[in-house]
Amino acid sequence: MDAGSATALGVAVVGVLGTLLSALLTQRVGERSRKREYERAEAAQERRAEAQETLACHIAFNTAVRQYLAALTDQIHELGRDGPDSVQQRLTEARDHHRDVYAEVQLRTSERITGLAGDLSRELGVLYGMVRRIDGGAPREGDSVAAARERLDALWRQLRHVRREMRTETHEPQTP
């Protein structure tokens, strides 16, 4: 074999190896690219699912607080009257449901929202205690139907504030 043939053979071998390695490298780069894209899509899906869970938690909290406030409103209207036991039963159920939903808020939402929800929940408890004392005929100094109504109005305002903050956290459009 002469030098020209050997060189041609060497060039051919290098060319074939280059072509094979090029195809192999292209395939590996493509696989890595697809894997990164899949991971990005999976991470985006997880973020969307987490946002949906947070939104559902916010909705459940808002609903539970509204039901609790409505039950407190009914109970305040019944103070001093011999109303049905169903009003007290509804208040107890609303309070228990709120407690369960608030526990989820504590685990699923940001520290800021948890703090706001905690403040609201404590104030609900204060009003509940006042209403129960008045209803039971053992009010403390400052406990009155008028004071209960004022606290109730303040709690509705506080709920609106918490709801606005929850919307901000979940990037939902602001509505009054």
Image (tube, grey):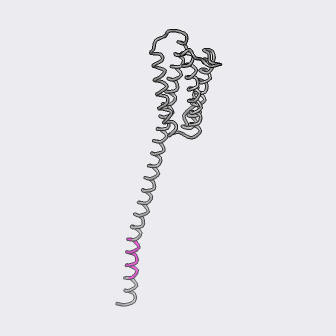
Highlighted magenta segment, given as a residue range: 10-20
Magenta highlight on residue 18? yes
Residue 90 percent coordinates (x, y):
46, 19
Horizontally, is 103 left or right of 6 in the view? right
Q: Quadrant of the C terminus?
A: top right
Residue 61 percent coordinates (x, y):
50, 30
| Residue at position x 52%, y 9% in the image | 81
| Residue at position x 56%, y 19% in the image | 133
For residue 163, which quarter of the picture?
top right
Q: Quadrant of the N terminus?
A: bottom left
Total numbered circles: 0
Magenta highlight on residue 46? no
Q: Nearer the viewer, residue 75 or 110?
A: 75
Vertical side of 35 occupied by 93: above or below: above
Residue 84 percent coordinates (x, y):
46, 12
Residue 88 percent coordinates (x, y):
48, 17
- Residue at the far left in the pictured view: 1
Vertical side of 146 occupied by 52: above or below: below
Horizontally, is 151 left or right of 55 in the view? right
Vertical side of 155 occupied by 40: above or below: below
- Residue at the far top in the pictured view: 81
Q: Nearer the viewer, residue 151 or 160?
A: 151
For residue 139, which quarter of the picture?
top right
Question: Magenta stretch: dominant SS?
Answer: helix
For residue 21, which quarter of the picture?
bottom left
- Residue at the far right in the pictured view: 142
Horizontally, is 12 left or right of 139 in the view? left
Q: Nearer the viewer, residue 94 or 51?
A: 94
- Residue at the far front in the pictured view: 138
| Residue at position x 51%, y 36% in the image | 105
